[in-house]
């Protein structure tokens, strides 16, 4: 709903749920990169909306971690590379 109505409470909830999802997906889990990308993709709009540098820094760190976890090859890394590039 944040995308349609701009409610920061919805975006904060989206981030909280994303953090919970990452915490339930331990190191070595095959889908961890997916959840890291999703959490980072929630932090970036909050930075855009509120301008808090910590949100952008965390998003970049999460995108970098997600990229490190992706298997080598364009089939798997394209989204992570694109997301990281968009945040930088």
Image (cartoon, rainbow, N blue to C red):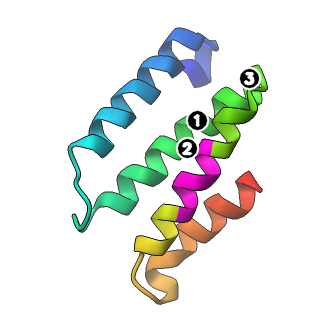
* 52 displayed left or right of 7: right
How far apart, in angstroms, are the residues tagged by discs 1 and 2? 6 Å
Q: Over which residues does the magenta segment extend?
A: 58-64
Image position, residue 24 (x, y; %)? 20, 43
Q: Are marks 1 and 2 in contact (CB under 8 Å)?
A: yes
Label 2: element kind: helix
**Mark 1: few/some/many CA within 10 Å (<14, 14-19, 20+):** many
For the stretch drawn in magenta, the main secondary structure is helix
Against 73, residue 55 (above or below) is above
Q: Nearer the viewer, residue 75 or 83?
A: 83
**In which quadrant of the rendered image does the C terminus lie?**
bottom right
Q: Identify the residue at horizontal 45%, vertical 46% (top origin).
A: 38
Label 3: element kind: helix
List the residue tagged with mark 3. 49
Q: How many marks?
A: 3
Q: Is residue 11 magenta?
A: no
List the residue tagged with mark 1. 43
Q: Earlier in the sequence, mark 1 or mark 3?
A: 1
Where residue 73 is drawn, which disc sits there? none
Image position, residue 85 (x, y; %)? 72, 63
Q: Are marks 3 and 2 in contact (CB under 8 Å)?
A: no
List the residue tagged with mark 2. 41
Q: Identify the residue at horizontal 60%, vertical 19% (top origin).
A: 4
How far apart, in angstroms, are the residues tagged by discs 1 and 3? 10 Å
């Amino acid at each position: 709903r944040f995308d349609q109505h701009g409610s920061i409470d919805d975006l904060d909830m989206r981030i909280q749920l994303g953090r919970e999802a990452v915490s339930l997906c331990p190191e070595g889990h095959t889908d961890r990169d997916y959840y890291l990308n999703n959490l980072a993709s929630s932090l970036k709009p909050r930075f855009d909306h509120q301008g808090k540098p910590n949100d952008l820094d965390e998003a970049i760190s999460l995108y970098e971690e997600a990229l490190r976890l992706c298997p080598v090859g364009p089939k798997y890394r394209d989204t992570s590379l694109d997301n990281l590039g968009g945040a930088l």
